[in-house]
Structure formats: C-alpha cells, structure tokens
Image (cartoon, rainbow, N blue to C red):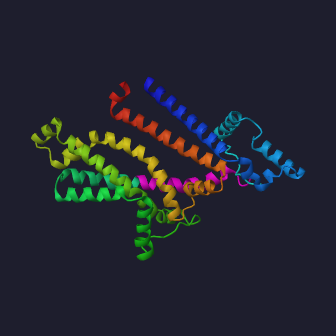
C-alpha cells in the first residue's frame, strides 16, 4: 500500500509543480492584457480603452494577484473549463480546440508507439539470436543511424521518397475523411515517429536478451534439450522486458516532442501544431491547457508503468 500511495502523492505533486511553473512563466514573461487587446491595452487615456481594459482584467482575473489567478485557473481546469483563447472576442473556447485537435494527436502517438513495439521486438530477438554476426553488426549500424537522425530530416526524407516521389502514401492529412482513410494518411507520420523509438527499444532489448541468455536457468533449459526458439520466446524474453517497459514509457515524452515536428511536416492539425500556433501568437490559455494535458498524460503513463513493473517483478514494491 505504501508503494501505491507514494507513487500517487509524487505524481500529484509533480502535476501541481508543473502547473505553477508554467502558469507563472506564461504570466511573468509576457503581457496577457496586451495579447488580448493589442495596442488598446496601452491606451489608458481613452475612456473606451479603459473600459475594455477593465472588462478584460475582470474576465481573465488579471486584476488579482498571481497566486490567486493560478488557484482560480487550476480550479477551472480541474472541472474541464480551460478558458477561452486570448482575443478580443474570446472565441473559440480552448476546450473546443482541444476536443478537435486531441484525437488526431492521440491517433498519431498510439500508431507510432504500436509500430515501434511491433518493429523492435522481433528485430531485437533476431539480433540477439545472431549476436556478433554480420547481421547483428549491420543491425547495429541501422539503429545508430535512426537514433542519430533528427526527426525533421527523417520526416522530410520519408515524405519526399514515399509520398511525393513514388506516391505510395498520402502526403497530407485531411481531417474530414473517414476514419480508415485518416488512419492510412497517418501511417507515414506515425512511421516517422516510430523508427527512432524502435531503434532505441531494439538496442535495449537486444542487450538485455544477450545478457539473459547467459544466465544459469537458460543454460539449464538448453541442457534439457529445449529448442532455441522456445528458449528465446518462453524463457529469455519475459525477464528481458523489464527495462523495455520502462523505456517505452519514458520515450512517450520523446514521441510527443517529435509529434510537434511531424505534425508540421505532414500538416496534421493536432495538438502539436496547435501549441506552435499558440506560442507564436502568445495565446497563454491554449499553451497552458496543452502543457497540462501532456504533463498529466506522461505522469499517468509513468504511474501505470510503475504498477505494471511491480506486478511483473514484486521485488519493486519492497524497494
């Protein structure tokens, strides 16, 4: 019980800390009132401008101290009220923007993570089974190339080669198309995100598999005549998955960061493109909402990974 309580308390504290730092930075480094009203915010000699300034301050709680504004914003966020975008009309609400963009980003990330796992696990098993061979050395070179290549470069190469040059995949994403059409349009962007992650997973799982294959229980299984296939899949794979599960959760943050670039390259109107647009126009409520959603997602994923890890290896709960 202490294990679960400590993880949940730590997760809650982290979310609160990120929200406070992000909210403070957004309000201290910029001028929310100017972003809402534009030049009108500086025209304090005009009674009409003053009236607009006072109305905006009341609407966005800008007339209150920063800690009070943070508490009010946090209370609204918990209830699902993300506020409105910074503009003279205050439209559309941030929640509408999130509801429109979030499913596309989730589709991209789920497809990318699924692809990365599907690619990396058999790849790692194959390399471990042929450790130090020409096949394994070639595989190592490929993984280093994929890990070292920037996401934007890989995305441009794949888009030009497979979409523009050969027309094997759609070059853009159309939000109003049917689901399966959108999934097909999302295949190449997801592959762009998946390949570097698959390379990381492959390196880690290959190393763990090679180490596990040297353990006494594996040697015992081999001495009893267990086939090489069964040794790999039934005896060596599960104990080698501990680090794999952990790194899969950690790299979710990398996938989200890469999605910012991939959504721009393939013109996918998701959260990545939304936060880029919001930062450029200093739309603080949109930035805050997306940062919090990403933070909560990462924290929840890591808590779930801790739980899964403790189920696989009960010794973790005792630590």
Query: In terms of secondary structure, what is the magenta stretch mainly?
Result: helix
Instruction: Reply yes or no: does residue 100 show up in magenta.
Output: yes
The image quadrant that residue 281 belongs to is bottom right
Q: Residue at x 17, y 40 (%)?
A: 214
Residue 57 locus on image (x, y percent): 78, 43
Residue 101 can be seen, yes or no: yes
The quadrant of the picture occupied by the C terminus is: top left
- Residue 178 percent location from the top left of the image: 55, 65
Residue 231 placement: quadrant:
top left
**Horizontally, is 60 left or right of 214 in the view?**
right
Give whichever of 207, 220 is nearer the camera: 207
Say above or below: 215 vs 83.
above
Q: Is residue 112 above or below residue 293?
A: below
The spot of residue 10 in percent (x, y) is 50, 30
**Residue drawn where x is 26% and y is 43% of the image:** 208
- In-image side of 311 versus 189 (left or right): left
Say whether residue 1 is visible. no
Residue 292 in the image, given as x and y percentages of width and height: 58, 43
The foreground one among 319 and 68 is: 68
The residue positioned 44% from the left and 69% from the top of the image is 159
The range drawn in magenta is 90-113
Report if residue 37 lies within the magenta region.
no
Residue 226 lies left or right of residue 52; in this view the side is left
Q: For this rendering, which residue is in front, 76 or 282?
A: 282
Quadrant location of the N terminus in the rendered image: top left
Task: Please tell me which residue is depicted at 42% across the width and 60% down the height of the picture.
Answer: 192
């Amino acid at each position: 019980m202490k294990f679960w309580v400590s993880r949940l308390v730590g997760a809650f504290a982290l979310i609160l800390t990120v929200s406070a730092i992000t909210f403070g930075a957004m309000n201290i480094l910029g001028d929310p009132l100017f972003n809402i009203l534009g030049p009108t915010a500086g025209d304090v000699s005009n009674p009409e401008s003053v009236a607009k300034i006072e109305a905006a301050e009341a609407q966005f709680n800008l007339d209150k101290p920063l800690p009070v504004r943070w508490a009010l914003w946090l209370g609204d966020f918990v209830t699902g009220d993300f506020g409105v975008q910074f503009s003279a009309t205050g439209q559309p609400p941030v929640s509408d923007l999130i509801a429109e963009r979030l499913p596309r980003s989730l589709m991209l990330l789920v497809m990318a993570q699924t692809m990365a796992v599907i690619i990396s696990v058999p790849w790692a098993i194959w390399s471990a089974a042929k450790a130090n061979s020409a096949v394994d050395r070639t595989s190592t070179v490929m993984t280093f190339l994929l890990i070292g290549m920037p996401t934007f470069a890989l995305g441009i190469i794949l888009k030009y080669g497979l979409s523009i040059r050969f027309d094997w995949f759609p070059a853009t994403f159309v939000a109003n198309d049917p689901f399966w059409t959108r999934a097909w349009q999302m295949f190449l962007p997801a592959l762009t995100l998946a390949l570097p992650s698959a390379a990381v997973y492959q390196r880690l799982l290959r190393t763990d598999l090679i180490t596990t294959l040297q353990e006494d229980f594996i040697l015992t299984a081999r001495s009893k005549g267990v086939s090489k296939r069964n040794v790999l899949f039934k005896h060596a794979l599960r104990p080698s998955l501990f680090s794999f599960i952990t790194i899969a959760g950690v790299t979710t943050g990398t996938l989200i960061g890469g999605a910012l670039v991939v959504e721009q390259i393939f013109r996918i109107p998701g959260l990545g493109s939304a936060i880029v647009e919001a930062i450029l126009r200093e739309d603080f409520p949109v930035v805050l909402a997306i940062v919090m959603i990403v933070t909560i997602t990462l924290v929840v994923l890591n808590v779930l990974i801790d739980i899964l890890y403790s189920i696989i290896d009960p010794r973790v709960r005792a630590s």
